[in-house]
């Protein structure tokens, strides 16, 4: 299976221009043969909102909004799966969301569970369950940027059978790209982080988008410039939860000791 990410610099408030850029870069990903492409967080609007008025004018319904419709049409026509961060509105609330579209069109939306810093002023906390989707030969889960700081998110998705985490991001702190090496090995899972670049309203984003394999290997790593990256991965690597002849990632977990501190998750 071929998977990839797009790292670029969305322009705040210029939704039409951003969507045009996204379509051009997605097309490059399709030409490289990608089955699945991950875009950054809030990639249609930009990140640094300063008022509810801005949110009102830039947010969209999902799936009826223009960005979702355009990306769903692209995905249907090119027979590709796309995960993209979008600014969603529903019933007077705003969500920092990510949509999944594919050959059948719109497939689902994930609303960011853990809001970072001033996002808390403007966005509502996500109410999505952590859902695993069938995408080509893989099962994928979605989290958005700061969600990474809460290891339960990847753990739950891995326990539900995800081979691959799609991680749209607008990272500003220096920890994530290194910390996720631990998450990859601790869950024996692939992680694609699609980060943005540039400076927006004084906030600098860190770039460094990456693809990690279940053995903590960095399969791809970007710098701080625009990039469309596509690589081949063997999704089956994420099905092997053996660590040694005598150790298994799931069945070795001491649920008898974890309980009742952690009540979720049976051994699959
Ligand atoms: C972040 O969650 N955008 C840092």
Image: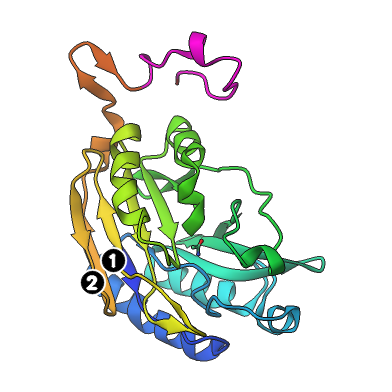
Give whichever of 80, 14 is nearer the camera: 14
**Residue sitting at x 20%, y 59%:** 220
Q: Which residues are magenta?
A: 250-267
Q: Position of residue 95 (x, y in %)?
A: 66, 64
User: Which SS class for mark 2?
Assistant: loop
* Residue 72 falls left or right of residue 209: right
**Mark nearer the N terminus (1 vs 2):** 1
Give the residue at the far right of this rendering: 91
**Residue sitting at x 56%, y 70%:** 86
> Vertically, is 209 above or below 175?
below
Q: Position of residue 165 (x, y in %)?
A: 40, 48
The mark total stands at 2
Per the image, the residue denoted by label 2 is: 223
Residue 142 visible in the current orientation: no
Q: Are marks 1 and 2 in contact (CB under 8 Å)?
A: yes
Image-quadrant location for residue 229: bottom left
Image-quadrant location for residue 209: bottom left
Q: Is residue 257 magenta?
A: yes
**Residue sitting at x 17%, y 13%:** 245
* Residue 236 falls left or right of residue 156: left
Give the CA separation, mark 1 to mark 2: 5 Å
- Label 2: how many Cα within 10 Å (few below 14, some 14–19, many 20+): few
Type of secondary structure dominating the magenta stretch: loop
User: Which SS class for mark 1?
Assistant: loop
Per the image, the residue denoted by label 1 is: 208
């Amino acid at each position: 299976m071929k998977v990839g990410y797009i790292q670029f610099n969305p322009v705040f408030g210029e939704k039409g221009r951003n969507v045009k850029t996204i379509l051009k870069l997605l097309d490059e990903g399709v030409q490289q043969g990608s089955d699945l492409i991950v875009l950054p967080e809030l990639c249609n609007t930009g990140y640094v909102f300063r008022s509810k008025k801005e949110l009102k004018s830039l947010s969209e319904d999902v799936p009826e909004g223009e960005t979702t419709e355009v990306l769903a049409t692209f995905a249907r026509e090119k027979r590709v799966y796309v995960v993209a961060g979008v600014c969603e509105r529903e019933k007077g609330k705003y969500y920092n969301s990510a949509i999944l579209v594919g050959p059948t069109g719109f497939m689902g939306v994930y609303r960011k569970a853990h809001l970072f810093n001033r996002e808390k002023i403007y966005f509502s906390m996500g109410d999505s369950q952590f859902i695993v989707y069938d995408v080509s030969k893989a099962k994928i889960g979605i989290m958005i940027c700061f969600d990474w700081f809460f290891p339960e998110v990847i753990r739950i998705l891995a326990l539900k059978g995800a081979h691959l985490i799609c991680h749209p991001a607008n990272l500003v702190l220096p920890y994530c790209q290194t910390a996720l090496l631990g998450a990859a090995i601790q869950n024996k899972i692939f992680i694609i982080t699609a980060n943005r670049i540039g400076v927006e309203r004084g906030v600098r984003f860190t770039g460094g988008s990456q693809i990690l394999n279940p053995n903590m290997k960095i399969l791809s790593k970007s710098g701080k410039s625009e990039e469309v990256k596509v690589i081949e991965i063997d999704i089956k690597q994420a099905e092997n939860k053996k660590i040694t002849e005598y150790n298994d990632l799931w069945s070795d977990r001491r649920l008898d000791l974890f309980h009742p501190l952690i009540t979720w998750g049976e051994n699959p």
